Amino acid sequence: MSKQPKGSSKASRKTKYPGVYSARNEAGGYEIVFDGPRTSGKRNQITEVLDPEKFNTAAKAASERARRIAEVQNGRFIEPCKMTVIEFLTEYIESRSPYIKVSTKYNYSCALKFFSNSAIANIQIAKLNAHHIEQAMIEVIRNGLGVSSARLYLRLLSRSLRKAVRQKLIAENPCDLVELPRSTKKEVVIMSPEEMLSYLKSLSFEGIWNSFVKDLGYHEKDVKDLWSKYRLHGIGSMPDDISAIEKKIKKKADASEVYLNLATLFFGTGARRGELLGICDDDIDFQSGTLTFRQSVVRGFKGRPFIQESLKSDSSRRTITIHENEMRVLKRQIMLRNKQKIKLGARYNDNGLVFATPDGRPMRPSVVSLRFRKTFVAFERPDFSLHDTRHTHASLLIMAGLPITDVAARLGHANPAITLSTYTHFLQDRSKVASDKWGEILRNASV
């Protein structure tokens, strides 16, 4: 048994207040001793070291001891829980695991990884305070994960600690006192109709052909003339340097066709990435011209794609009418997929997906985004992202005069207010059109 430091015995640390002693730590302060609720009829003596900053005098410590005793007598006392933040958070996530989506599990695993390496990991939940949590959230932001990630992690921690309050492991949830800066609202980025069609053309066989020929050093006008000649007379009418690269052009065009089809549908439906990657043959009604979203492809553990039989929210499950152009693209995509199924036979992993890898597996969402990212950069729109195709679809419909409620339903927004807040700028543009129309009415009116 190790010797106690000189002056560390309870008798030598007494104060003039009963049950209040000088604390045995470098930070100083006080510890209090009092009887907690009896367990199995036996005395339950509790010793607690108080925060030296908050309780910096023996009188304050005595006042806190009196408050704890009153709580015991009134049946409101909660004995400090010795579980650490990471222990309780891990237990909470495990208890929730059977009831949450795969995408949520992935977000939780990222949060758990962060908290495991954070300064609050080994703090007991009974001693956790708002300052500790705020410092941890600042760490999230400093690490480059952003305010949105900090808010996500804080929500998870808060939910777990609400459970601790219900179980009477802690008296209150310290997350309720934490304030984070608001996320900077990202400006909505869109393409004009002309720009959108030009981008889609760049992914087509013609666009890829033009790109290869330009790289050979031909001028813009010559490229157009050569393309017209190629379409009319074939490769035999082309110069030798173009004939030499025809196989390369066709190979790239074949590999890019699925992305051209995806891009056409992203712009034409306003669907989320996972929603479009999750559509099956049964979701398409060619007779009525409708497309139903009922499942999604999400990122699972270790980045593997996973088919999730649910969407972001209940309102995300929807059926929309699509243009005949998008219907033709879907028919073309199904034909390409079926051709691949016949080619691979039993080796094809048939998940019923319209958009799939060459062997039938779900497409990896992150790979799809990266592939599109490269095409936007090549198109000289590095500011544009795959999700901006959704913004483009919605914004162009609003500017065309479609009611906001119809746009919200088409996007799968739970509340039209979400659509309003996102696309306010474009509604203002419509308001200007309305005021111009009103001025025209007055000018044409006769008295």
Image (cartoon, rainbow, N blue to C red):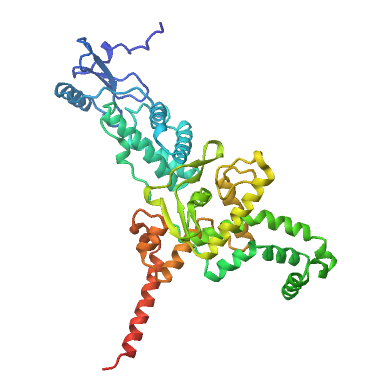
**Residue 7 appears at what percent x and percent y?**
32, 13
Residue at figure coordinates x 33%, y 85% from the top left: 441
Q: Quadrant of the N terminus?
A: top left
Residue located farthest toward the top when viewing the structure as drawn: 1
> Residue 94 falls in which quadrant of the image?
top left
Residue at figure coordinates x 66%, y 50% from the top left: 339
Q: Is residue 236 above or below residue 278?
A: below
Please indicate whether residue 156 sits to the left or right of residue 109 in the image. left
> Front-most of 92 and 25?
92
Residue at figure coordinates x 24%, y 14% from the top left: 45
> Residue 372 falls in which quadrant of the image?
bottom right
> Front-most of 180 and 195?
195
- Residue 184 visible in this rendered orientation of the protein: no
Q: Is residue 334 above or below residue 55?
A: below
**Residue 314 appears at what percent x and percent y?**
37, 48
> Residue 137 falls in which quadrant of the image?
top left
Residue located farthest toward the right when viewing the structure as drawn: 240
Q: Quadrant of the C terminus?
A: bottom left
- Residue 257 visible in this rendered orientation of the protein: yes
**Residue 390 appears at what percent x and percent y?**
48, 59
**Residue 33 appears at what percent x and percent y?**
24, 17
